[in-house]
């Protein structure tokens, strides 16, 4: 555990967050609304974490990550038979692989560029995808489509959880989030992670040391996209529908804000950022119908004053004395 | 006696639009020796180095490594063939330790760089390679210091250590002594003397005393053109060289 | 497609392209000179349109409303540069993205607060209403021709300023080498303020003139922003000439695709962009 979650703050956060998240529904059991709300936060955190890896750990700023989030949902509708319950695990696999394949193609185009160009081209490609789905009659246009049959979750004949029970689904998503964190920690601590970080810090030097920088970037892009699609797939299953707004640039934008709010590149900060942002969103929304104004001001203030995000702030607070 | 030819260029050219940065350069670089490249600013020395390490693609001409044409392969593949390059401006990973800098450089040799599940600290061999490279340049005591916190001279040494950690047979060094004090330069000169027993070194350097002291072969370039190649004394007494340098009034040999 | 329809589409495409150029030129100028990627640039277009609506209600005069809107947009640009953008010059692109996303949020909220979320419209002024006939059967609205000519005029003005004045010289120098301009001992902050303010004003002017042609709706800024990105990416980041060529290209392709390939129409410019980027990753006119 110490080896894995290196920093003290990070360990502390994990020991606090996951037990708390496990216990929280017990206090809300009567209220399905809150459990669903928590679930959607947890799902979105999976998405934000994949973006956090891409932007914070690989230095690839993308504004088109929501495309894969949306594709996760649409791919399910596209490949699953309409009136038949398919196996959840098998389709999880299919969707991740398909999204990875799409990311491979998109990545080859996108990664020819870098910096500002990459920001703009990722945004434009995601918009293309957005318009494709919102204009298409087959995919229900702006309204999207409903998932008529939810998948069956049995594995080797054993049903682990029931997708229709919000509580079951919440715990499953929480487990997924934890697994994602472990996965990204493994990746960043691996030999691949070492070179990826080198690529981020100094691509020219890394090329001069004999590494194919493009392939490192591409693999990272593919992995992050596949997990973004996984999050989108969970979202689609939770609400039972998909619509194009999943892939709107606002989805990418707010994910980016959450990731920076949490502390870019810290991975666990993605969870922090998502929880805080969604918490603020929820409470501001109740406070005033013009919550967007407060949110915007908050973001601007954050860029100006609060550069390292919440994770950086906490780390400073807890680990400064040495 | 001359050693075997390791790296060779034949009629190498690099044009930027109409500007001939490098024109018709044919040179041979030998094993276990230092080949100095000198010339006034804008002579095309850095262009030559960038071509030799694959950063630029030549407009025309060939580069032969161990007799094979390599001008068409990608930049990172040059390193895999054993052509390592040090930069003029210090080009290290400043935020990690010196040892980690060399681990990054050496990891390609132990493999697994695309393994996302293999811990980066799992290989004792890798650490050994990195430490060896640090010791070769005399930075053994700095292994756990963050690279941005060592002195400028030490960073130049680290730069060389990183190239060595890639296990090259050819070292392309771009002004390794640039911006250094006398003491520090001495250190690098002694280091290069030691290294030339094992490597083919191509040295671009402005410090003439150092070049004369180290070089077995010396090439003088002017305006992208080859002027003369020979041993140090030949070059020193060459009338064309004197003319080129005095005419330009740039540096005096 | 007969000739008359072709002509109408061509005119539409040119007019749309010129309008896009007006907006994209500000975006590309601000990036080229200042190194700032302003995602809130589309919001300036939206603000221009809403201001126009507001002042037309207030003054009942098209010209006066347009002038007032432009002046206010310019002031807004100057204030934003002085208070927010000038803290960003030494920061990375990520901070710029974040700050300008925050600005989009604020502008959208302000729009909803001040003017509501219902679609609004501005009438074409009397002296520009009506149509001229291209053939016996096909007519073309005068207002659209007016917009195209105005945009051309502004583009020509921009060209003259950039190529013939001292300010333009600094802008061109800043595009190719920002550090150098700073070394020349020029008050770089003032240059930045002027460029940013001008960029905002151009985008707002585009909003002003398009107000009578399309309905004024929330979210119009984001939509146009993405189109401008396509223009700037195709043209080459920071290149005014590139933006001009690319804007016309996007305008014409987009307009004709709507007629010829309706099922692909909203995607076609992105496909165009992807193809161009595969051939030239830095855009058509990159330095």
Image: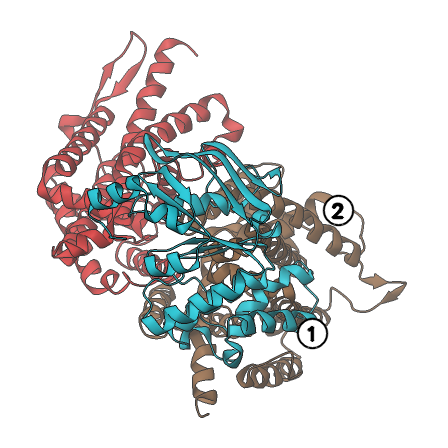
Chain colours: A brown, B cyan, C red
> Residue A80 shows which numbered tag?
2
Question: Which residue shows up at 39% across the image and 70% down it?
Answer: B186
Residue C210 horizontal/vertical position (percent): 26, 36
Q: Nearer the viewer, residue C76 or B194?
A: B194
Q: Chain of mark 1?
A: B
Q: Establish whether labels 1 and 2 are both on one chain.
A: no
Q: Nearer the viewer, residue B33 or B168?
A: B33
Residue A244 horizontal/vertical position (percent): 54, 48
Q: Is residue C5 visible?
A: yes
Residue A96 horizontal/vertical position (percent): 69, 53
Residue B8 horizontal/vertical position (percent): 53, 41
Element assignment for label 2: loop
Element assignment for label 1: helix
Callouts 1 and 2 close, C-beta under 8 Å: no
Residue C44's place in the image compared with A274, above or below, is above
**Residue C185 is drawn in which quadrant?**
bottom left
Q: Chain of mark 2?
A: A
Total marks shown come to: 2
Q: CA distance from mark 1 to mark 2?
A: 48 Å
> Residue A49 shows which numbered tag?
none
Q: Residue beneath label 1, please?
A: B124
């Amino acid at each position: 555990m110490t080896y894995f979650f290196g920093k003290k703050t990070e360990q502390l956060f994990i020991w606090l967050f996951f037990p708390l998240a496990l216990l929280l529904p017990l206090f809300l059991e009567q209220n399905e609304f809150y459990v669903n709300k928590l679930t959607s936060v947890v799902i979105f955190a999976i998405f934000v974490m994949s973006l956090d890896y891409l932007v914070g750990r690989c230095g690839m700023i993308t504004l088109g990550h929501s495309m894969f989030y949306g594709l996760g949902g649409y791919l399910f509708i596209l490949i699953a038979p309409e009136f038949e319950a398919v196996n959840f695990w098998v389709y999880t696999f299919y969707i991740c692989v398909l999204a990875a394949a799409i990311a491979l193609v998109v990545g080859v185009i996108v990664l020819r560029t870098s910096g500002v160009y990459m920001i703009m081209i990722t945004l434009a490609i995601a918009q293309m995808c957005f318009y494709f789905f919102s204009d298409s009659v087959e995919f229900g246009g702006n309204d999207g489509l409903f998932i008529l049959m939810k998948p069956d979750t049995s594995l080797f004949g054993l049903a682990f959880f029931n997708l229709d029970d919000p509580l079951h689904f919440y715990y499953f998503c929480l487990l997924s989030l934890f697994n994602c964190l472990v996965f990204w920690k493994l990746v960043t601590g691996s030999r691949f992670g070492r070179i990826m970080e080198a690529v981020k810090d100094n691509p020219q030097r890394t090329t001069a040391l004999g590494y194919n920088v493009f392939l490192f970037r591409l693999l990272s892009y593919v992995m992050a996209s596949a997990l973004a699609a996984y999050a989108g797939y969970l979202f689609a299953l939770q609400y039972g529908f998909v619509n194009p707004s999943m892939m709107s640039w606002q989805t990418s934008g707010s994910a980016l804000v959450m990731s920076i709010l949490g502390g870019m590149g810290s991975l666990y900060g993605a969870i922090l950022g998502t929880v805080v942002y969604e918490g603020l969103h929820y409470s501001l929304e109740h406070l005033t119908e013009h919550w967007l104004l407060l949110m915007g001001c908050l973001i601007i203030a954050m860029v100006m004053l609060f550069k390292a995000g919440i994770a950086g702030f906490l780390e400073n607070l807890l680990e400064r004395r040495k | 006696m001359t050693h075997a030819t390791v790296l060779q260029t034949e009629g190498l050219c690099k044009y930027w639009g109409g500007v001939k940065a490098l024109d018709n350069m044919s040179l041979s670089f030998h094993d276990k020796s230092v080949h100095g490249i000198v010339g006034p600013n804008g002579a095309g020395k850095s262009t030559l180095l960038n071509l030799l390490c694959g950063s630029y693609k030549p407009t025309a001409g060939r580069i032969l490594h161990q007799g094979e044409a390599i001008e068409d392969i990608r930049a990172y593949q040059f390193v895999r063939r054993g052509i390592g390059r040090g930069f003029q401006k210090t080009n290290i990973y400043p935020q990690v330790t010196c040892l980690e800098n060399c681990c990054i450089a050496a990891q390609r040799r132990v493999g697994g760089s695309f393994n996302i599940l293999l811990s980066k600290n799992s290989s004792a061999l890798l650490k050994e390679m990195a430490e060896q490279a640090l010791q070769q340049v005399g930075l053994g005591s700095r292994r756990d210091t963050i690279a941005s916190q060592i002195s400028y001279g030490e960073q130049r040494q680290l730069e060389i250590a990183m190239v060595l950690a890639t296990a090259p047979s050819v070292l392309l060094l771009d002004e390794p002594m640039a911006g250094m004090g006398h003491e520090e330069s001495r250190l690098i000169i002694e280091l290069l003397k030691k290294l030339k027993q094992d490597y083919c070194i191509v040295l671009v350097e402005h410090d003439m005393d150092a070049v004369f002291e180290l070089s077995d072969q010396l090439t003088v370039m002017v305006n992208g053109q080859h002027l003369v190649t020979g041993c140090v004394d030949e070059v020193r007494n060459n009338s064309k060289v004197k003319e080129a340098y005095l005419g330009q009034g740039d540096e005096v040999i | 497609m007969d000739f008359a329809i072709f002509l109408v589409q061509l005119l539409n495409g040119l007019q749309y392209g010129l309008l896009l150029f007006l907006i994209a030129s500000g975006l590309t100028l601000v990036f080229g000179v200042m190194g700032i990627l302003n995602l809130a640039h589309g919001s300036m277009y939206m603000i221009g349109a809403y201001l126009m609506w507001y002042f037309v209600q207030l003054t009942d005069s098209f010209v006066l409303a347009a002038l007032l809107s432009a002046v206010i947009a310019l002031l807004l640009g100057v204030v934003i540069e002085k208070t927010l953008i000038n803290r960003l010059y030494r920061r990375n692109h990520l901070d710029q993205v974040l700050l300008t996303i925050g600005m989009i949020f604020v502008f959208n909220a302000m729009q909803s607060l001040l003017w509501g979320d219902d679609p609004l419209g501005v009438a074409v002024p009397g002296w520009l209403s009506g149509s001229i006939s291209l053939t016996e059967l096909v007519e073309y609205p005068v207002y659209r021709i007016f917009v195209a000519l105005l945009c051309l005029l502004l583009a020509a003005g921009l060209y003259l300023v950039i190529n013939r004045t001292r300010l333009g010289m600094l802008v061109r120098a800043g595009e190719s080498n920002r550090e150098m301009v700073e070394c020349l001992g020029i008050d770089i902050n003032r240059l930045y303020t002027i460029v940013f303010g001008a960029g905002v004003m151009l985008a707002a002017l585009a909003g002003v003139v398009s107000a009578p042609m399309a309905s004024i709706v929330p979210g119009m800024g984001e939509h146009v922003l993405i189109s401008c990105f396509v223009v700037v990416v195709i043209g080459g980041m920071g290149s005014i000439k590139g933006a001009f060529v690319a804007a016309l290209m996007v305008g014409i392709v987009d307009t004709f695709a709507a007629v010829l390939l309706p099922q692909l129409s909203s995607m076609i410019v992105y496909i165009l962009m992807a193809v161009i980027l595969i051939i030239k990753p830095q855009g058509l006119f990159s330095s």
